Image (tube, rainbow, N blue to C red):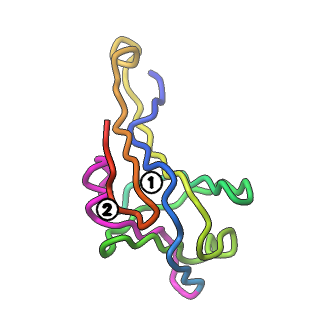
Amino acid sequence: MRTMLKSKIHRVMVTDTNLGYEGSITIDKSLLKSANILPYEKVEVLNLNNGARFETYAMPGGEGEIIVNGPAARLVVKGDVLIILSYVTVPDERAANLQPKLVFVDDKNRLLSKV
C-alpha cells in the first residue's frame, strides 16, 4: 500500500480567519467538488507565505471563500496564499496509474482550470 496525492487546490488566497471556531478550513464548495474533496475529509494545508503546514478537515463554503478556522487560524493571515492537498492510500499496483485532481484558481479563488 502507498499513500498518494489525490487532490491539489493550487494557490488559493485566505479570505478570512475565525479563531473562535473549533477547527477546519472552509473552502468554496465548487473548488471542493472540482478537486474531489468531500466535506469533513482530512486535508493538508501549506502556507506559501510563511512555510506553515497543518492538517485539518474541509468544510464547504460560499463562492471564493477560503477561511481558516480554530487554532490553525494563528498560522495564516488574510491574503496568505495556500496549497490544499488530500491523499489516498491505494494498493501498489494502482499507485503508478493514479492521476490526482489538480485545481488552479485566479486571484479571486475562482476556478481557472482542472486537470
Q: Which residue is identified by label 2? A: 39
Name which residue type carries label 2: Pro
Identify the image quadrant of the C terminus.
top left
Q: Which residue is at a point 59% across and 71% down the rendered structure image? A: 79
Using the image, determine if residue 6 lies above or below residue 70: above
Q: Which residue is at a point 73% across and 53% down the rendered structure image? A: 51
Point out residue 30 in the picture as x, y percentages from the top left corner.
Answer: 26, 61
Which residues, given as a range, are shown in magenta? 20-38
Name which residue type carries label 1: Lys
Q: How many marks?
A: 2
Mark 2: few/some/many CA within 10 Å (<14, 14-19, 20+):
some
Point out residue 94 in the picture as x, y percentages from the top left corner.
Answer: 33, 17
Point out residue 55 in the picture as x, y percentages from the top left corner.
Answer: 56, 56
Q: Which residue is at a point 42% across and 70% down the rendered structure image? A: 26
Distance in Å between CA atoms under marks 1 and 2: 9 Å
The answer to whether 75 appears left or right of 84 in the picture is right
Q: Which residue is at a point 48% across and 74% down the rendered structure image? A: 67
Q: Is 23 inside the magenta-drawn segment?
A: yes
Q: Is 79 inside the magenta-drawn segment?
A: no
**Mark seen at residue 42:** 1
User: Is disc 2 placed on a helix, strand or loop?
Assistant: loop
Residue occupying the far top of the picture:
93
Which is nearer the eye, 57 or 15? Answer: 15
Using the image, determine if residue 9 lies above or below residue 39: above
User: Is disc 1 placed on a helix, strand or loop?
Assistant: strand
